[in-house]
Amino acid sequence: MTITASGLYGLTWEKMFIDTAAQSMEAETHKVLMVTDTYAPNFDTHDFRDDITNEVTGTGYSAGGIAFTTTDWTITPAGTLTYDFADPAWPTSTIANAMAAVTYFNVGTAATDQLLFLMDFVTAASSSGGTFTILIAATGAVTLDFTP
């Protein structure tokens, strides 16, 4: 199975909601990495970074990705909770066939870094000696609607 949609990694979110993840979503040390379309995400069982396969490679890209910054939660009177962060970018990079971004709590090792969510690019993206930027939607990276 290849990447067919964006999604939340359920086991980590469950840990956050029952307060066993011991992580703050607004920490500025969490990371984003990119994968090719040959990674087969399992949102029910993948919970740590060592479950991720087929990470992209290339000039200007380091395994494990980069930290994302300017993290923020916003709640609206309409009953939505939105998580957002600054657009991650890899300057002067040559990256081929990036199909999705995976965000995770940067705890310390691939076996302990807890997965948050995957953002499907829908179409593979590449850069050639330029800046590869993931444009986060103006409405945020994740929006939870908790109205009945």
Image: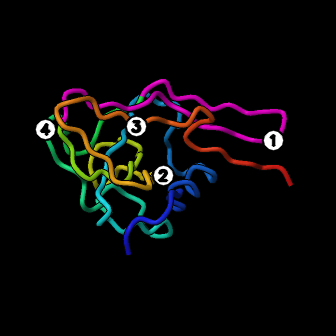
Q: In the rendering, which numbered label is found on residue 134? A: 3
Tags 1 and 2 touching, CB below 8 Å? no
The residue mark sitting in front, 3 or 1, is 3
In this figure, which residue is indicated by the disc labeled 2?
117
SS of the residue under disc 4 = strand
Range shown magenta: 69-93
Q: Earlier in the sequence, mark 3 or mark 4?
A: 4
Q: Earlier in the sequence, mark 3 or mark 1?
A: 1
Residue 140, position in %: x, y? 59, 36
In this figure, which residue is indicated by the disc labeled 4?
59
Tags 2 and 3 touching, CB below 8 Å? no
Residue 69 vertical position relative to residue 25 in the rendered view, above or below: above
The residue mark sitting in front, 1 or 4, is 4
Q: In the rendering, which numbered label is found on residue 79? A: 1
Residue 61 vertical position relative to residue 101 in the rendered view, above or below: above
Q: CA distance from mark 3 to mark 1?
A: 27 Å
Tags 3 and 1 touching, CB below 8 Å? no
- Residue at left offset 70%, top offset 40%: 81
- Residue at left offset 40%, top offset 37%: 134
Q: Residue furthest bottom?
A: 1
